[in-house]
Amino acid sequence: MKALCWHGKEDIRYDTVPDPEIEHPRDAIIKMTCCAICGSDLHFFDGFMPGMKSGDVVGHEFMGEVVEVGAENRKLKVGDRVVVPFTICCGDCEQCRRGNWSVCERTNRKKDLGDLTFGHTTAGLFGYTHLTGGYAGGQAEYVRVPYADVAPVKIPDGLSDEQVLFLGDIFPTGWQAAAQCDIQPTETVCVWGAGPVGQFAIRSAVMLGAEQVIAIDNVPERLDMARAGGAITIDFDEECVLERLQALTAGKGPDKCIDAVGMEAHALRSLDSMIDRVKQSVMIERDRPHVLREMMYVCRPAGTLSIAGVYGGMVDKIPFGALMNKGLTIKTGQTHVNRWTDDLLQRIADGQIDPSFVITHTVGLEDGPSMYKTFRDKEDGCIKVVMKP
Amino acid sequence: MSNSTLHPLSRILPTKPYGPMRSPARALGWLSIGLGLAELAMPRRLARIAGAPNAPRLTRVLGLREIGTGIGILTSKDPSPWLWARVAGDALDVATVGAGIVTRGRPLRTLASVAMLLGIAYVDMKVAEGAPPAKKREKRSSRDYSDRSGFPRSAAEMRGIALKPSSPMGRPQGTATAMSGSPVQPLVRAGEPIGSSLP
């Protein structure tokens, strides 16, 4: 079959690889009908994600049709149409039973690496680093789904692939980012980053009743889309973020702050960002936490910081004094996708939201390698790339 | 994988090496930093080896310059200006080391160092000539997403929709933030093995 494979920094190839096979009775094989490039995929594309191996099949946002099912899988049958969450969950461990799906204790088959890196293993992820299991990903014609009797979400007829594809990652990620803020009707929510996750976080905050939603970015098309979703926007290339936030919140600061940027903050004009970049280049800091610093500084006392953006390792110069003295709460984590999928699928079916609004480019899988760069460089107004086999 | 941020764990993973010398420009960046650190740490010894004048302060200044250009090469999307800065620095180095012919009295060693520096300058120049300039993103494309709300009605009308059970599109209160799909079951017994029975 054909698949997109990682071969190094900025080196994604459309390769021929062996077809996946059922390896365990709970597995299923999915014929991919629609997949996407996620912002998290850019971390390995840009060489910031450790533990990748040449030839890895990448991608964790995908859906398709079930073409083969293991003997013990009672949930799926051939012909089912499913969205597959990016987290692989066993459904049996203590964390899965608590609904903490993204920290499943069993599915990372490279558990030792997970333990070594993060202290404790987290769930296995599709098409990502070997620190999270090294499972083959979904930017491929066929995908083996382990524990396929747990996480995959069956899709009813009448909804298009484009409407439901993002249930596997970015819609629940944006939703969880907003939901864990416990938004009150008088509150201002500020979202750093108006990429795909940021766009869903904005709409989720609106749907969850925020009085005011503010989005920060510097890409005009993304800011346009953010405004369309109900946000007031700040272009950090043109305006002083701190001054605008003070003005928009009567000097109080946003009550809830969402980081939809993560480890590769591009606000390079600020001094701390320049220092981060230098330190990152000589391997004395892994991530660029400009957004974290800014959130801690501007957030209203007793507020909440919700971190949906992905971080990989060490960060420096965090204003922990501000965090502690203002009594801020941090909520973060990879998304517990299956916490939200039933509810969000119903909202899509009800017509409350059509997630396909975020798709700006639809291409064939064979065009994937070039689209990584287009997406990364935000060329041609690119916000979200969907690929079809 | 970029080694500018290579995780220490990557060394123990059986992965194809993508070392710091992934591209000539990056190799020169690391060379700059290495040489700069050496000039900072042991200026006298380095000057003696190269047959350059014994001027530790000047050597340290040159070392700082080397580190600066190295970081510039490694961090910037367009390393060309930094590579040309290296070429200019090479000229300075040749002049400095060349002065050792007079002060050191070991012309052969000094000449050998100058020859090596000229060789490095040639490599720097070739790499600088070959480095593609970074493409700058147009500030705005022709695409217009100002109508892409994703909502069936205006954002103002959709505000709080997830919390309004009376709304025609609303859902029962509480579902918005409840852990739907998360079966709350009795927890596993203490001591249950984890990380096992992987399919």
Image (cartoon, coloured by chain):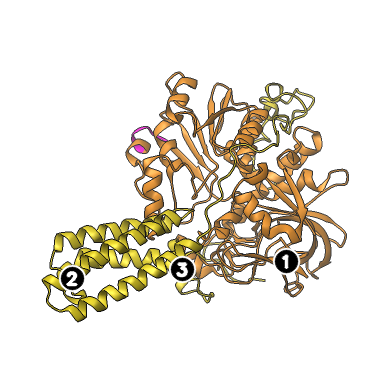
| Magenta residues (range) | A324-328
Residue A373: % across, % down: 62, 54
Residue A91, above or below B183: below
Instruction: Say which element carries label 1.
Output: strand
Report crowding for label 3: few under 14, some 14 to 19, many 20 or more residues within 10 A (C-alpha): some
Q: Main secondary structure of the magenta part?
A: loop
Residue at (60% x, 51% y) in the render:
A376
Q: Amino acid at mark 1?
A: Ala
Residue A82: % across, % down: 79, 54
The tag earlier along the polypeptide, 3 or 2, is 3
- According to the picture, the residue beneath numbered tag 2 turns out to be B52
Report the Cα–Cα distance between label 3 and label 2.
27 Å
Examine the rendering and report whether any part of residue A149 can be seen: no
Residue B108: % across, % down: 20, 81
The yellow chain is B
Instruction: Say which element carries label 2.
Output: loop
Direction from residue B136 to residue B120 in the image, left or right: left
Instruction: Say which element carries label 3.
Output: helix
Query: Same subunit under labels 1 and 2?
Result: no
- According to the picture, the residue beneath numbered tag 3 turns out to be B24
Q: Chain of mark 3?
A: B
Q: Decide: marks 3, 1 in contact (CB < 8 A)? A: no
**Residue A359: quarter of image:** top right
Figure colour of chain A: orange
Q: Name the residue nearer the viewer: B6 or B21.
A: B21
Q: Amino acid at mark 3?
A: Pro
- According to the picture, the residue beneath numbered tag 1 turns out to be A3
Q: Chain of mark 2?
A: B
* Image quadrant occupied by the N terminus of chain A: bottom right
